[in-house]
């Protein structure tokens, strides 16, 4: 396991988003050397359609921009499989193999979701990029059992595990043991029962227990710190990122 940070952690809650170079600089200033790239078509400098249209050019631009090691793409919203294919090529050029896609909203028929995820997996597979579906309240994956069933129905699909939604969400008391063997990627912040994000140390996330459980499954992926811009005061963000990074590195 290793610690990374999502570029989402450096985006403002409102107003224009900084360019990629500035996001990378802020990540380096807070002590991170590995980066999850948060992709959002509507907001931020990393638009999936632009990356997918010219994957080699994006990879070259990234290398010219930063020495931080990219470890994953994470899609804020769903994209067509053709975009997934282009993102997988960009990931291959940057030498990582992890792509997180969102789950569909609650109420989506299970079979429709299976077909959608199969299409994403098929698009990424030629580049040997793994696709995982994020666990989030309000989406089909908010139920651990449904997330596991999706992984079983789509061979090769994994889970991007975000424990915050199992602390403050509707499935806080539900057993999620079966999820662990399907985890490809992890996103972290501290969370209380009534707030999705709180200051590090004031929440209910037991990082030591989580890491011990991941080790039992021989998990070797990222622990990506992902602070939500709308939940973090700008002046507190750097301190919170440093605190959580240092805590995770101490436990490794």
Image (cartoon, rainbow, N blue to C red):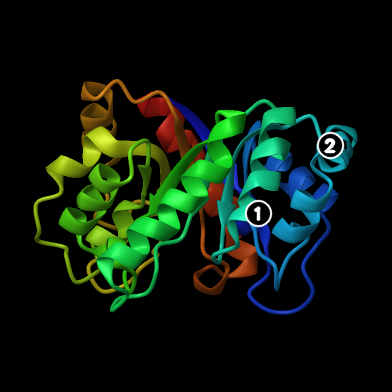
Locate residue 80, reporting x and y percent.
Answer: 60, 61
Viewer-nearest residue: 69 or 148: 148
Q: What residue lies at 56% left-to-right and 51% top-to-bottom?
A: 74
| Quadrant assignment for the N terminus | top left
What is the number of the mark on residue 30?
none
Q: Mark 2, residues whose alpha carbon is within 10 Å: few (<14), some, or many (≥20)?
A: some
Secondary structure type for disc 1: helix
Q: Is residue 12 left or right of residue 247?
A: right
Locate residue 104, reporting x and y percent.
Answer: 39, 68
Q: Is residue 36 left or right of residue 58?
A: left
Q: Please, is residue 249 above or below residue 24 in the view?
A: above
Q: What residue lies at 21% left-to-right and 31% top-to-bottom?
A: 213
Q: Please, is residue 95 above or below residue 171 in the view?
A: above
The answer to whether residue 153 is visible is: yes
For disc 2, the marked residue is 56
Labels 1 & 2 near each other (Cβ < 8 A): no
Q: Write down the quadrant of residue 192 in the picture.
A: bottom left
| Quadrant assignment for the C terminus | top left
The answer to whether residue 225 is visible is: no
Q: Earlier in the sequence, mark 1 or mark 2?
A: 2
């Amino acid at each position: 396991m290793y610690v990374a940070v999502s570029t989402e952690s450096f985006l403002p809650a409102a107003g224009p988003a900084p360019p990629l170079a500035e996001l990378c600089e802020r990540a380096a200033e807070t002590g991170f050397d590995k980066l999850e790239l948060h992709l959002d078509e509507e907001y931020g400098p990393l638009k999936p359609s632009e990356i997918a249209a010219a994957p080699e050019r994006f990879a070259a631009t990234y290398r010219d921009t930063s020495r931080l090691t990219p470890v994953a793409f994470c899609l804020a919203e769903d994209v067509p499989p053709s975009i997934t294919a282009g993102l997988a090529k960009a990931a291959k050029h940057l030498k990582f193999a992890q792509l997180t896609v969102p789950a569909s909203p609650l109420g989506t028929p299970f079979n429709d979701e299976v077909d959608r995820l199969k299409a994403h997996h098929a698009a990424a597979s030629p580049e040997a990029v793994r696709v995982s579906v994020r666990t989030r309240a309000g989406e089909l994956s908010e139920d651990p059992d449904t997330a596991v069933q999706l992984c079983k129905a789509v061979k090769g699909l994994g889970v991007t595990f975000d424990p915050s939604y199992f602390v403050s969400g509707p499935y806080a008391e539900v057993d999620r043991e079966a999820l662990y063997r399907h985890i490809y990627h992890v996103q972290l912040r501290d969370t209380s029962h009534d707030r999705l994000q709180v200051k590090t140390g004031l929440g209910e996330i037991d990082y030591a227990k989580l890491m011990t459980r991941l080790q039992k499954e021989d998990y070797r992926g990222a622990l990506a710190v992902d602070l939500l811009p709308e939940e973090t005061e700008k002046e507190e963000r750097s301190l919170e990122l440093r605190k959580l990074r240092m805590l995770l590195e101490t436990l490794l």
